[in-house]
Amino acid sequence: MKKFDIVITGDCNLDLIFNQFNRLPGFGEEIIANQFELALGSSAGIVAAHMASLGAKVAYVGAIGNDHFGNQFKAFIQSYGVCTDYMVEKTGFKTGCTVVMSKDEDRANLTHAGAMAELSPSDLPWQLIEKTPFFHLSNPYVLPHFRNNLPDLYKKLKEANTVTSLDPQWDVEETWNTNLKALFPFLDYFLPNEKEFELLLAGNSVTPEALSTISTTTIIKTCGSAGIEMLQSDKTKQYTSYLNEQPVDCIGAGDAFTAGFLTATVEGKTLDDAIDLGSKAGALSTTTAGGKVPYNSRQDFADSFNKLF
Ligand SMILES: Nc1ncnc2c1ncn2[C@@H]1O[C@H](COP(=O)(O)OP(=O)(O)O)[C@@H](O)[C@H]1O
Ligand SMILES: [Mg+2]
């Protein structure tokens, strides 16, 4: 009997978000920010929170330290109904934290990765993964034990008989050299944004057409407000977004899209329907600030969407 619809892993940090200040402080200065928020951070954590809010049964795996921020991270993600039983604690490391200094459309981020960077594939709950139909990884490039081992990891996941997805996010080392040809035979859904996809194609010296014929991987490329392009070996298809012409901000839109897409996919919906739910979740996330989940149930999601779009 399956206990969860999906195991989600990847980055794991809190965000300390400072707003309403005139300029960034220089060394030796102090500047007052008139607004502050402590929020759930990390792409994987935010996808987990959105999916649980949409009704999926989610186990999240990330690495925290034995500290207050670790407890706070757990409390945040549990409040959305995500299971944290399989999270790991790394002794001697601090829970990851990003200071976000946010002004208009721009943000200056300062991150201490700490415990999250210590997560390794051997920390994953492999027995649980074997019993869970779906696995998602987000932001492997901030995880040193994952970033150069993705083909091996996904091979092992395939052997565990799970359906897999990957959101690469930005390569913080900007090498963009993940071996996609080795990875794709074991990967079911690849979820980069437009820029990430372009850089990864260049890093692999491969065209999208050639890449899509390597395997049965479905590539879902998100293009911000312009929508989505889906590529499979025998076809490509464009989808428009539910355009929000005046987004509050687009932080977390990709994670919300991924959560909507994966929720419909684990429910056995068609690819078109999954992209549609993802587009709705992505659009809705642009109507509120930051990566917050702006609904607390599937009904609330539908009601908010129908009111705003
Ligand atoms: N202004 C917008 N209006 C409506 N939907 C949007 C907007 N911006 C983003 N989205 C939705 O969110 C999805 C992901 O956004 P994108 O910016 O491509 O990802 P990321 O946040 O990972 O960079 C888009 O494919 C789209 O469905
Ligand atoms: Mg993204």
Image: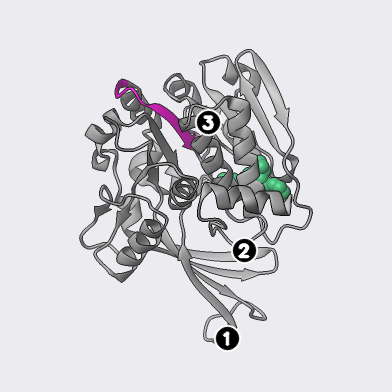
Label pair 1/2, CB-CB below 8 angstroms: no
Q: Amino acid at mark 3?
A: Phe
Q: Which residue is mark 1?
A: 32
- In the image, 54 versus 197, the foreground residue is 54
Real-space CA distance between mark 1 and mark 2, rounded to the nearest whole angstrom: 20 Å
Kindly identify the residue that appears in the image at 69 percent across and 63 percent down.
105
Q: For residue 57, what is the image quadrant?
A: top left
Percent of width and height locating residue 290: 58, 61
- Give the magenta range: 159-166
Q: Is residue 119 left or right of residue 181?
A: left
Real-space CA distance between mark 3 and mark 1, rounded to the nearest whole angstrom: 42 Å
Percent of width and height locating residue 276: 64, 35
- In the image, 171 versus 19, the foreground residue is 19
Q: Amino acid at mark 2?
A: Ala
Q: Secondary structure at mark 2?
A: loop
Kindly identify the residue that appears in the image at 47 percent across and 24 percent down.
188
Kindly identify the residue that appears in the image at 31 percent across and 26 percent down.
156
Q: Which residue is mark 2?
A: 289
Percent of width and height locating residue 1: 26, 29
Q: Of label 3 and label 1, which has the lower sequence position? A: 1
Real-space CA distance between mark 3 and mark 2, rounded to the nearest whole angstrom: 27 Å
Q: Which residue is mark 3?
A: 190
Kindly identify the residue that appears in the image at 52 percent across and 86 percent down.
28
User: Can you say whether 23 is above or below 257 in the image?
Assistant: below
- In the image, 54 versus 237, the foreground residue is 54
User: Can you say whether 280 is above or below 129 in the image?
Assistant: below
Q: Amino acid at mark 1?
A: Ile
Q: Of label 1 and label 2, which has the lower sequence position? A: 1
Q: Secondary structure at mark 3?
A: strand
